[in-house]
Image: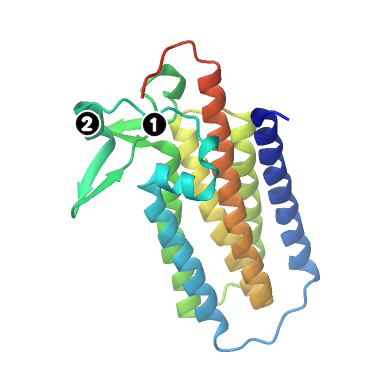
Amino acid sequence: MTQTVHRNLTVLYLVSISLIGLILASILLFYTPTSQDFPWRRPIISSTYALICILGAIAVFFPKRCSRAIFLKKWETTPTPYKTPQLDEMRTTTFFGFKLTHGHHPNCEGFSGHEFQIGKKTYCAGCIGLLIGASISLVTVSAYFISQVQLDKVAIHLFGFGFITVLAGLLTPIFIAGRSTIRLATNTFLILGMSSILVGADTLLHNIQIDLYLIALDILWLTTRISLSQLNHERICAHCTQECVP
């Protein structure tokens, strides 16, 4: 079995498990009885989810390192962009001594829809979408758990919104190539959908096991989304006729 076939099967497996997990979450929502609440449920879930959002936001600015930490290094075949001083200045920003990377795709036509430019800086649309979604989710989910606000009347709508946006976030990279605006929007709403599912389910069930299951699903969905993006990068490079030298 070639590496390409193995990679395609692995991505197919991740997508399949992600969709099954999403469907199972919907089934559990209607067939799991409401649990007896206890004082430490909200702090445990809110702190766990907040930690994931913070780590995800940090990972946005170190895409190569985090890709190698999550996936096999040989899977990432997208060439490293040309490291001229001009391009490095466009793709990075130094913040308190740390060099943050916000543009990391090769400067060629095949990846033109993967980044956008503001002023003299280029930004990865997918990564910025994840950052926006994680930032909003961190605030909203933390506010929900800390304030103990009651959302019973809209809980099912929150779950439905999350179901649709997560489904779109997982399937869009497969069926729609998309411009940078589409990539930014689908990634943003993917993360917002994850938080909406968690809040909706928690409001209805008050079940820590279901909450932890959904948080685990969030990690799976994000991993699947990243693997789909990497596979798309490899296919772009495979069909490219230009010579690309790191």
Could you say which is closer to the camera, residue 154 or residue 194? Answer: 194
Give the quadrant of the N terminus.
top right
Could you say which is closer to the camera, residue 164 or residue 86? Answer: 86
- Above or below for 234 versus 100: above
- Above or below for 86 versus 185: above
Query: Dot 1 surroundings within 10 Å: few (below 14), some, or many (20 or more)?
Result: many
- Image location (x, y in percent) of residue 140: 45, 65
- Image location (x, y in percent) of residue 77: 50, 30
> Can you tell which mark lies on residue 115?
1
- Image location (x, y in percent) of residue 173: 59, 34
- In-image side of 71 versus 24 (left or right): left
Q: Which residue is located at x 78 percent, y 67 percent?
A: 30
> Can you tell which mark lies on residue 85?
none
Q: Earlier in the sequence, mark 2 or mark 1?
A: 1
Q: Mark 2 points at which residue?
A: 120
Q: Which residue is located at x 47 percent, y 29 percent?
A: 78
Q: What residue type is labelled 2?
A: Lys
Kindly tell me whether residue 154 is visible in this rendering: no
Q: Which amino acid does label 1 sit on?
A: Glu
Q: Is mark 1 on a helix, strand or loop?
A: strand
